[in-house]
Each structure stands twice: as C-alpha cells, then as structure tokens.
Image (tube, rainbow, N blue to C red):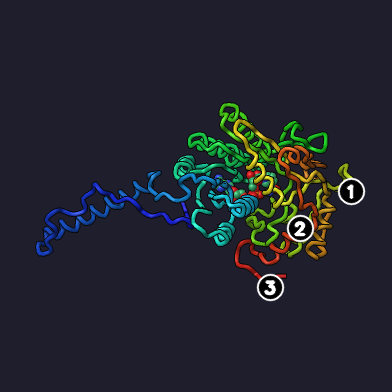
C-alpha cells in the first residue's frame, strides 16, 4: 500500500529474536570470523523475516486518528477517490470536516488529484490515501481492520458502456464482484453505512419518460447489468442486516468540475475513444480530435438527436453528502440523481461551442447501435426526501467551468500548461 499522508512507523521490535551471541565476536580467528559473518547474515535474515511478518500483521501500524473512532468525526472510506467523481466527493467531504480515506488502484484515477486534496487538507487525521485493488479481498480486509470507518462511499468502478460490451467479464468482476468484497468487509468490521454509485444505465431503455425510481430496471449492456447486480446484492444484504443504512444513487450523465478549478475530469488518453460527450467536446475544442461525431439525427426527439440528462458533478456530490446525512439503519434509499431536464446532443454541442469559444466541427453520422433516444430523470423523490435539487443546471456554465480547468490541463493532471490556448 502506498500511503503518503500518514507515516507508518515500525512500532514494535522483534523482541524474542536474539541477534548476537552472548560472548560477542572475535575478529582474530578466521574460522570464528566466518562464523561471525554467518551469524550476521542469519540475524539480518531473521530481522527481514520479522519485519515482513510484522508488515503482514493488521496491528503493524501505529494507531493514528484513522484507526479509531472519534466522537463528532465521521470517517468516510471513498473508494475510487482518485477518479473524476470520487475526487470531487472527497473534496466536498473534506470541506465539510469529514475524515476521508481514499482507496484506489489508480487504474483509471489520478494520484495528482489526491495530492491536490492532500495539499488543501494537510492536517493530520484529515485525509489518507491507500493504494489497493478492491478485487484483493485480503488487502480490503486489512484496510478495514486497520481503519475505523463510519461509512463507505463506493465509487470505484470501470464505467464505460462501450467498453463493457467488449470486455464484459472485466465489468462483472470490477463492479459486481468487487462490491461483494466491499460488502463482506463492511459486515465483518461492523461498518453500517453505504452510499453506492449506481447509474441510469440500470434502467435500460424504458418506454416512458421521465424515469422514476419505480421504472423497471432492464439494463441492456454489461455495465448496466453489473451495476444492477451489485444493487440487488446490496438490497438482499440489507434485508438480512437491519443495522445497515444504504443509499443507492443512480446518476444520469455527469459533467462539469470544481467551480474553484482545483479538480477536473481527466480520463486516460487510451479511454478517449470510449469517452463521454463532454470529453469529446473539449478534445475537439483543443484540436486533439478533428471534430465531434454526432451519431443519429433521426430519433423521435425535437431535433432528431439523442436526449440526455446532464448532472453537474458539484450537484452530484452534494446529493452524496445529503444521502450520507439522511442514511438510517434498516432503511434503503434509492434515488435518481439528475436535473429532470433532457438536452439534445445538438443543444449540448451548441453549449460547448459557446463555452469554449471554438467553432467545433460537427459531423453527423447514422445512429450507433444500442443508443436510446431519450433518457431523463424524474428528480421529485430526491427533492422530497433528501431536500436535494440540482443548482448547476445551466449547461453552458457547467461546460465553461470544466473548460477553464481543461484549458490549463491539456495533459490532464500532468504538468500544467498555463499558456495553453
Ligand atoms: N461519470 C459518469 O457519467 C457516471 C454516470 C453514472 C455512474 N457513474 C459511476 O460513478 C462512479 C465513478 O465514476 P467516474 O466517472 O468517477 O470514473 P473514474 O474512472 O474517473 O473513477 C473510478 C476510479 O475507481 C478506481 N478503480 C477502478 N477499479 C478499481 C479497483 N478494482 N480497485 C480500486 N480502485 C479502482 C479508478 O482507478 C478510478 O480512480 C463509478 O461507479 C461509475 O459507474 C459515473
């Protein structure tokens, strides 16, 4: 595990292991000298063995603020906190005085985002980062035994619909099976509160709009199916464990970034192809790709292009904090997190052109198989029950904020190019 906010000290010595003979060493006798070297080597070997064993031990680390519960402090495990949404959520939690542990395997996230958070909140006991893969049950178990979590926000996942159809097993493993690992550790270590990142992809292609939480879930791709399976496991578990407090949030299309420009969305270059519309829009504005390809202009929508519900990440993390505050033992809350308003791809492109000030080239192509015409949420339930409502609903403004970050971060979280564009 890589841990750079909390210094792990070797607190215990190998008390029972003698490192040298009583009589000391005699350097004049070559036979004895050979003996002495041998002894030193054996001792060094034993010390190494001892240290390795200690490192395996869950109690190896000196207790820190992270390892015990503190009255008045809520310690949240943020899985996937180096990623786009997870890092924004961690920022908000830290701002609101939560204690945060980020666990991420950095397969898709950015360590630099965590470092920014660390610089903003350097005080001991605020933020720690643990490098680990949630597929590694032993590592996850160790993390839970070494840390006193009060709640888990489980963001970590691979999250591209197209990729999920090409590599379904990866999605079932990473999303469904890893959620199982997290749940087992929560049960074993008595952590009762879970805020789960789900998606509108679990609904598939509903006939009726807007989508309510009662809309039947009939996912049509492995990503949506894997998330639905994870939801089902969580629901079954909660029936058996009355102490569990669960909130499942089904996000619509997430856009935007921190209005103060500290964090942004920076997917790996190799994921651009799989990418989301906002990423493609910024790439086109920066000339990384020649233009935008709009697939499908003959859908039954007002302007013929697909309609989606774009939710700003600042609003989304606000929904998480409200969900955490309102989570109650024995209760499962399921909420759509969207604006309730659908925007067409054409509208999105127009907003993107205005936000970036670039006259992005647009190519109109035939429909892409598997795309649905219209998806937008009914956000009434979350408004009524969690008192949450989307505030960043001006598409152009959300894109302008995100573009500000993108402009100076042409390499994502790589070296800042202040003079760019
Ligand atoms: N971005 C969206 O539009 C959107 C929409 C609906 C739902 N979601 C959900 O929100 C969550 C976060 O998505 P995001 O857009 O921030 O994605 P992201 O790729 O930016 O972040 C995911 C993070 O999880 C980490 N991760 C992945 N597998 C891991 C593993 N096995 N162990 C430890 N860490 C692992 C990655 O390294 C990355 O930092 C996901 O669960 C996703 O399904 C996202």
Q: What SS does tag 3 mark?
A: loop
- Is label 1's Cβ within 8 Å of ligand 1? no
Name the front one of labels 3 and 1: 3
Figure check: 255 above or below 178:
below
Decide if residue 352 is on the left or right side of residue 316. right
Q: Earlier in the sequence, mark 2 or mark 1?
A: 1
Q: What SS does tag 2 mark?
A: helix
User: Does residue 162 appear anywhere in the picture?
Assistant: no
**Which quadrant does the C terminus fall into?**
bottom right
Measure the alpha-carbon separation of dots 3 and 1.
38 Å
Mark 3 and mark 1 residues within 8 Å of each other at the beta carbon: no
Q: Earlier in the sequence, mark 3 or mark 1?
A: 1
Q: Earlier in the sequence, mark 3 or mark 2?
A: 2
Query: Disc 3 marks which residue?
Result: 419
- Is label 2's Cβ within 8 Å of ligand 1? no
Which dot marks residue 221?
none
Query: Disc 2 marks which residue?
Result: 399
Q: Mark 2 Cα within 10 Å, few/some/many (few <14, many 20+)?
A: many
Q: Mark 1 Cα within 10 Å, few/some/many (few <14, many 20+)?
A: some
Measure the alpha-carbon separation of dots 2 and 1.
21 Å
Percent from the top left, x then y, of residue 381? 75, 37
Q: What SS does tag 1 mark?
A: loop
Percent from the top left, x then y, of residue 140? 49, 42
Percent from the top left, x then y, of residue 31? 11, 58
- Is label 3's Cβ within 8 Å of ligand 1? no
Percent from the top left, x then y, of residue 312? 73, 51
Decide if residue 14 is on the left or right side of residue 327. left
């Amino acid at each position: 595990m890589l841990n750079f906010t909390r210094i792990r000290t070797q607190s215990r010595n190998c008390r029972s292991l003698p490192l040298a003979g009583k009589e000391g060493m005699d350097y004049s006798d070559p036979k004895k000298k050979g003996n002495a070297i041998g002894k030193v080597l054996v001792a060094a070997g034993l010390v190494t063995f001892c240290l390795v064993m200690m490192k395996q031990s869950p109690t190896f680390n000196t207790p820190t603020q992270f390892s015990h519960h503190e009255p008045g402090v809520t310690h949240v495990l943020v899985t996937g906190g180096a990623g786009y949404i997870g890092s924004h959520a961690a920022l908000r939690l830290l701002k609101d005085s939560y204690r945060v542990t980020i666990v991420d395997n950095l397969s898709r996230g950015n360590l630099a985002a965590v470092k920014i958070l660390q610089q903003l909140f350097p005080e001991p006991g605020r933020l720690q980062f643990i490098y680990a893969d949630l597929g590694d049950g032993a590592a996850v178990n160790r993390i839970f035994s070494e840390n006193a979590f009060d709640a888990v926000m489980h963001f970590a996942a691979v999250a591209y619909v197209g990729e999920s159809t090409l590599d379904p097993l990866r999605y079932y493993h990473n999303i469904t099976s890893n959620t199982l690992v997290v749940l087992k550790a929560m049960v074993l270590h008595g952590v009762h509160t879970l805020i789960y990142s789900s998606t509108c992809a679990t609904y598939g292609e509903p006939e009726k709009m807007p989508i309510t939480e009662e809309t039947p879930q009939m996912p049509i791709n492995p990503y949506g199916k894997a998330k639905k399976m994870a939801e089902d496991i969580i629901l079954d578990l909660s029936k058996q464990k009355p102490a569990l407090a669960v909130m499942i949030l089904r996000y619509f299309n997430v856009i935007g970034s921190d209005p103060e420009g500290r964090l942004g969305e920076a997917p790996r270059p190799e994921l651009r192809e799989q990418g989301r519309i906002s990423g493609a829009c910024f790439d086109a504005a920066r000339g990384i790709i020649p233009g935008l390809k709009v697939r499908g202009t003959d859908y039954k929508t007002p302007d013929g292009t697909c309609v989606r519900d774009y939710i700003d990440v600042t609003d989304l993390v606000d929904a998480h904090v409200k969900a955490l505050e309102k989570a109650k033992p024995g209760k499962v809350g399921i909420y759509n997190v969207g604006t309730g308003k659908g925007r067409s791809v054409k509208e999105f492109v127009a907003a993107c052109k205005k936000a970036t000030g670039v006259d992005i080239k647009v190519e109109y192509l035939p429909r892409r198989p598997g795309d649905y015409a219209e998806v937008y949420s009914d956000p009434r339930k979350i408004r009524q029950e969690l008192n949450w409502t989307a505030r960043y609903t001006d598409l152009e403004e959300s894109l302008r904020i995100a573009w500000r970050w993108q402009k100076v971060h042409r390499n994502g979280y790589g070296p800042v190019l202040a003079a760019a564009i």
